[in-house]
Image (cartoon, rainbow, N blue to C red):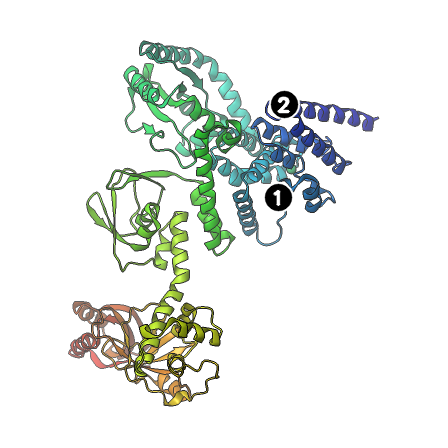
Amino acid sequence: MTQMLRESKKQTTEDKLIHSLKSILKSYLDSSQINKIISAYEYAKLAHQGQFRKSGEAYICHPLSVAILLAEMRMDMHGIIAAILHDVVEDTLITQEELTLKFGKQVGRLVDGVTKLTKIDGRSKEETQAENVRKMFLAMAVDLRVIMVKLADRLHNMQTLEAMPRAKKWRIAKETVDIYIPIANRLNMNEMRHRLELLSFKSMYPLRFKVLKASIKKVRGNRKEIIQTIENSIKNRLKEMGLECDVKGREKNIPSIYKKMKRKKIPFSDVFDVYAFRIFTENINSCYQVLGGVHNLYTPIPGRFKDYIALVKANGYQALHTTLSGPYGVPIEIQIKTHDMHKISESGIAAHWLYKDDSRQNFQAQANEWLRELLEMQESAGNSLEFIENLKIDLFPQEIFVFTPQEGVIKLPRGATIVDFAYAIHTDIGMRCNSARIDKQLVPLQTQLENGMTVEVITASWARPSATWLNYAVTAKARTGIRHYLKHFKKREAAQLGKRLLEQSLHDLDLSFDEIPEEKIERLLLAMQIPSLETLLEDIGLGNRMPFLVAKRIKQDNFCAAIKLDDGDENTKVPLTIKGTEGMVVTLARCCHPIAGDSIVGYFNAGKGVVVHHHACRNSRDVRKKQATWLDVKWCDDVIGEFSTEIRLEVKNQRGALASIAEIISKLDSNIENMTVISQDDKVSIDSITLSVRDRVHLAEVMRELKKLSIVLKLTRIKA
Ligand code: MN
């Protein structure tokens, strides 16, 4: 008996759904397309046969409902078919290949995208969710329809959440709040967002929902009259001005009332005491005329006017916002927009399907641009968690607007710095930025920007992105740019050093790099089985290949013969000059801390490049005996820089001893980088100090002054 009841109930729900789906489809698809959709429905129905939703309905009702939600947005045929089939691969034995065979590549790919988003398990919770979101964005970047199906799927699941156990309900609602609502927001799908917000609030806080709903109902009656009064005065004023507009009172929805109460810590009555209106106009010009009109009617509240028409929000939202002080001083919030702006702000990215005309293509292009950036970001991010961190900044943009000196407007998320600004203008500007002027004041790169600032980036030809920028760059564009640079940085530096080394070795053999015919280089590369000259130079710079061997090979022009040479007797006559600022491929040894002016030696460390040691360094002497990979190096004549070096002091253990040492060091323009106590007793303390100096002369000066102190018993430089 119950079985029969269920049967008959199932029949009616399903029939109703298919009927309403058909009638919506008829309004925008032709009959051959609708027939294809119907055959997909029959296929899915068969596949899900015997499966039921928690609510007791046949499973097929779920994909049908999802299809209806999408049909309301005028999703195209492939999207609708994918919606109907979206759970088939996940929940039945049918494979994606079968779907592709039957319904074509497009549908197969869409279903695959939606399915992938569901199949994630294992690992820590946070990481799983991060991975989930990452996959979603990748799928979305491939085809926006995937995310539309996923959002509609989520909306229907939220609508039917009642049947779920409490814990599961909470988890699904929370996930909706954390992931799906921000995505809907980012895609400017406000209707979808509001529906999801309302449903999640209702599931997560059923009691609060009930109370707020009752409170709204109670005060609604009292408000009617005053709403009518305000509406009429606005309408009359606009009529006097000869403007044709729709004026609509707007009631705040429950989740946003709750959010505002929580954020501002104010009671319900204070939130709800605001009277909100929307004014719809025909075109942009009249938006500003209306603004003038209402500002004339009631006093505007300073600082509350926002022009999102001129400064479009990142998600494409456009309108004028203002707050007025109305009759009896009640606050009136007004949004002014064209009908078109409103349509787009309700359906966002879906407007692409809803209203097919060129003016909206712009929006689609914007969304695609954003997705492309996400893809780049994903490629450069180390792992899912990092990707999510970047994404969060993008998804919850609290925007600020700053100006270029030419009055251009740049939109950035709150917390953005000069680096973000520079990259936002152009990647090349980002790469070369060095400092900036804000409202004529010189400021460093990490300065956070604020609304309305005029920023002028100062670039320098020698400036390069550094890893520390990642500490304060927040936009995806800047972070991607910096990472990209750092990744290729070492290679480039290595190739540059490699070229210098090779040039030098060639010079010793009376050859010049620039005069070697290209064809000869080509043959060399072929013989050595190296793909490009760049790779060869990199290899040399990284110490994987000996420059003098390569040079010899070039000189002999005997590329086929394997080279067997004794490295030991190699003597390069001209030493390689070291500036100390070569970057990652030249490092100064940490054992002996060589500084400018020291006599130094270098040796190749495979994969690391050249490591420079003090010639007296014990470590270097030990290795030198075994290795033949030593290189004559000398300091470049005009070294400019700061070098770290280490000194060892025996100091009388008395009050203020270290303070007087520190004072001398800083007076002489040196810096203490690190200080450790090696040993200490009642009388003497032995300390090691790492300090930065310009060169040998500077260090000598510091040491001389320190020795003058009566508390200093012994002072030596540590050379390993
Ligand atoms: Mn589903």
Q: Quick one: label 1 or label 2, which is nearer the N terminus?
A: 2
At a point 38% along the width and 87% down the height, the residue shown is 622
- Identify which amino acid the numbered label 2 is placed on: Lys
Q: Is residue 449 visible?
A: yes
- The picture quadrant for ligand 1 comes to top right
Q: Nearer the viewer, residue 610 or 230?
A: 610
Asked whether, in this view, residue 147 is left or right of residue 707, the answer is right
Q: Residues within 10 Å of mark 2 (few under 14, many from 20)?
A: some
Q: Is residue 54 above or below residue 693?
A: above
Marking on residue 26? 2
Read off the residue under disc 1: 109
Quarter of the figure with the C terminus: bottom left
Under circle 1, the secondary element is helix
As drawn, 321 above or below 561: above
For residue 133, above or below residue 585: above
Q: Nearer the viewer, residue 332 or 21?
A: 21
Q: Quadrant of the N terminus?
A: top right
